Image: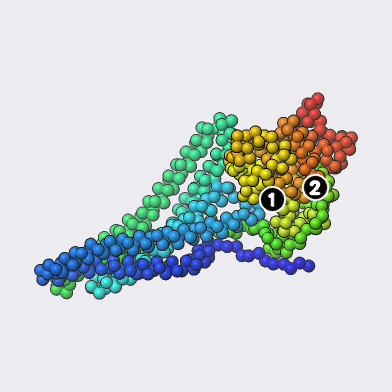
């Protein structure tokens, strides 16, 4: 019995922030030191005003007046230098946090089970990976969390100087702090809801654009430009509404309400300060210095309240990031598929036998979660080197077999084995390294032809890809292009025809030198002549390999050793082409529907 291990606990945004900030302690320490120096320099300016009004001017000390004026010019310059260095460090650390979140989330999404990943729109993945991580790291940490260090130092220093000048005035000035904080805390939930609504709107817009641009041919073919223009207009209107609402509320909580309270308290400070000056217990210079400190203290207060408001935005985005971190991962490395789809235990890998691939399904059933079964009690065996064709009506469950072999989904019942070894005992890396897949939904990178064939190797070596291209009957086409194998295929390969993309995908599969070759509707878009060439190439390429071919066009699998006819997730017929035709069942109906001399039958 193999040992069982538990998968790692899901990661989360805020623990990752703490972990990354611990790594940044040297830079944070430098940031604190610069903040101390900057705060100290900033606190000098009002004291220079006091010295000028209370000492230098009454004594007519021209030399002291000159020195004080030089100090008044030098202090802002020094403060600007410290602030610039402070800003650089905050941006660097904040970007480091965003980079850590993006890297960890990207690494996680690469291994998330497809069934879970497909519950989200592509635009949601992109938004959370880019915008949400950026708002947490670059905006919240860099612009609001890290300045708390500097602001706390500045606030303590400012309040200390104000208390030293006149403690009773300081007590009066501090009335603004609890009032503003209470206002912010009372609106915290409303703030979170606003940011959640804004984030949802932005995600929808990004998802829509990710669908729109690849679908331009469909939009224009159906004259749907006006419809899509209206949809985008609705989004713009909704985005403007919620953005204006968020901005107005942000301004109200961070600036308008605190400043209104500040003005009232400042008026009280002036009134009481004037009374103290008249009574002779406070000098004019001290009052001017105190009043110079006052807006600094209130500015720090507004920054602290702003951090509280932006914390709600960070929490909303952290929740979105955490929802992706919570998705279950496929086993990687030496981890293997769980024996139970709902299980959280993974076994260790068992290396496959170094023999030709033999594939077996035993009573396999799988449900996509829509109430219907993608596969129902499937049982069949493919011997090493055997060519198995799979046909049947659309939606009958043919492609589900490919997905289950690849480990994209886990069957609820039954077992799938290769060379007698249950797939659950094979690591996914080991399993997939033995398979060459040509999927129905073709995908090519916006890169050169040779790199697409050599993928995932990042090499542009024509020699390593030419053999596979010749086997896929596409070498003549490639060499006829101006840039040959270094031709860029365009986004999703749209600069090539569908038939060219399919042959290129076949070449990529053959380049892996697989033991098991899986083709899912791989020749559906090829003309008869090209299909014949690809079929001949396929016959040569599959020598020594087991081949499972899902086909709509029956000519693709006419030479199959055995054909499985799938309907409603079940195997309803099996045999070679002649045997199936002689029975007059579903395969015979499909065959007649594709014959030129008989009318088409609706399937």
Whole-Å distance between the Cαs marked 1 and 2? 33 Å
Q: Quadrant of residue 472?
A: top right
| Residue neighbourhood size for the residue with mark 1, other residues' Cα within 10 Å, grouped as few (<14), some (14–19), many (≥20) | few
Q: Nearer the viewer, residue 73 or 274?
A: 73
How many marks can you see?
2
Q: Which residue is mark 1?
A: 369
For the residues bearing labels 1 and 2, Cβ distance under 8 angstroms: no
- The C terminus - image quarter: top right
Q: Residue furthest front?
A: 463
Q: Looking at the rendering, which quadrant does residue 65 occupy?
A: bottom left
SS category of the residue bearing label 2: loop
Task: State the SS at label 1.
Answer: loop
Q: Quadrant of the N terminus?
A: bottom right
Q: Is any atom of residue 492 visible in this view?
A: no
Say which residue appears at 53% left-offset and 64% top-offset.
16
The residue depicted at 45 percent of the width and 57 percent of the height is 138
First in residue order: circle 1 vs circle 2: 1
Q: Does 234 appear above or below 72? A: above
Report the residue at 79% width, 34% height from top: 555
**Residue 60 locus on image (x, y percent):** 10, 68
Question: Residue tagged by mark 2?
Answer: 545
In the image, is residue 383 above or below residue 557? below
**Crowd rating for badge 2 (residues with CA inside 10 Å; few <14, some 14–19, many 20+):** many
Colour theme: rainbow
């Amino acid at each position: 019995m193999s040992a069982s291990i538990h998968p790692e606990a899901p990661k989360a945004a805020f623990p990752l922030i703490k972990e990354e900030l611990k790594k940044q302690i040297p830079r944070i320490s430098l940031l604190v030191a610069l903040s101390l120096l900057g705060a100290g320099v900033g606190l000098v300016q009002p004291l220079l005003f006091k010295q000028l009004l209370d000492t230098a001017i009454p004594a007519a000390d021209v030399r002291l007046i000159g020195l004080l004026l030089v100090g008044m010019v030098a202090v802002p310059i020094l403060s600007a230098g410290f602030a610039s260095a402070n800003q650089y460090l905050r941006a660097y650390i904040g970007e480091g946090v965003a980079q850590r979140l993006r890297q960890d989330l990207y690494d996680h999404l690469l291994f998330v089970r497809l069934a879970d990943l497909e519950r989200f729109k592509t635009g949601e993945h992109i938004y959370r990976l880019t915008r949400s991580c950026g708002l947490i790291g670059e905006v919240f940490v860099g612009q609001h969390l890290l300045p708390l260090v500097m602001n706390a130092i500045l606030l303590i220093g400012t309040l200390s100087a104000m208390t030293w000048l006149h403690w009773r005035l300081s007590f009066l000035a501090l009335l603004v702090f609890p009032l503003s904080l209470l206002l912010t805390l009372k609106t915290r939930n409303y703030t979170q809801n606003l940011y959640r609504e804004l984030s949802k709107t932005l995600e929808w817009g990004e998802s829509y654009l990710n669908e729109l641009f690849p679908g331009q041919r469909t939009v224009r073919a159906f004259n749907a430009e006006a419809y899509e223009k209206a949809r985008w207009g609705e989004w713009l209107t909704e985005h403007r509404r919620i953005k204006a609402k968020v901005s107005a509320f942000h301004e109200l909580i961070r600036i308008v309400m605190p400043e209104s309270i500040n003005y009232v308290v400042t008026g009280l400070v002036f009134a009481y300060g004037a009374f103290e000056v008249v009574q002779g217990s406070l000098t004019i210079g001290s009052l001017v210095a105190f009043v110079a400190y006052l807006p600094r203290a209130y500015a720090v207060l507004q920054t602290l309240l702003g951090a509280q408001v932006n914390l709600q935005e960070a929490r909303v985005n952290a929740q979105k990031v955490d929802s992706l971190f919570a998705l279950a991962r496929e086993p990687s490395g030496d981890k293997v598929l769980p024996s139970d789809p709902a299980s959280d235990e993974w076994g260790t890998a068992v290396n496959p036998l170094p023999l030709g691939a033999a594939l077996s399904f035993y009573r396999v059933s799988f449900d996509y979660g829509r109430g219907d079964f993608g596969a129902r009690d499937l049982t069949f065996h493919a011997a090493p080197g055997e060519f198995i064709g799979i046909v049947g009506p659309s939606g009958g469950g043919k492609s589900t077999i490919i997905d289950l072999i690849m480990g994209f989904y886990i069957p609820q019942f039954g077992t799938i084995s290769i060379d007698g070894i249950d797939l659950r005992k094979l690591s996914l890396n080991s399993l997939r390294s033995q398979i060459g897949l040509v999927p129905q939904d073709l995908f090519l990178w916006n890169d050169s032809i040779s790199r697409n064939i050599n993928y995932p190797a990042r090499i542009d070596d024509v020699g390593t890809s030419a053999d596979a291209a010749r086997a896929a009957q596409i070498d003549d086409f490639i060499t006829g292009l101006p840039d040959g194998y270094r031709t860029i295929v365009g986004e999703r390969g749209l600069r090539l025809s569908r038939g060219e993309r399919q042959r290129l995908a076949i070449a990529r599969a053959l380049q892996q030198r697989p033991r098991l070759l899986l083709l899912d509707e791989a020749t559906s878009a090829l003309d008869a002549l090209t299909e014949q060439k690809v079929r001949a190439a396929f016959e040569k390429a599959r020598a020594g390999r087991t081949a499972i071919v899902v086909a709509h066009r029956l000519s693709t699998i006419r030479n199959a050793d055995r054909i499985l006819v799938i309907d409603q997730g079940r195997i309803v017929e099996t045999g070679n082409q002649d045997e199936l035709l002689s029975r007059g069942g579903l395969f015979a109906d499909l065959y007649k529907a594709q014959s030129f001399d008989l009318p088409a039958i609706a399937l």
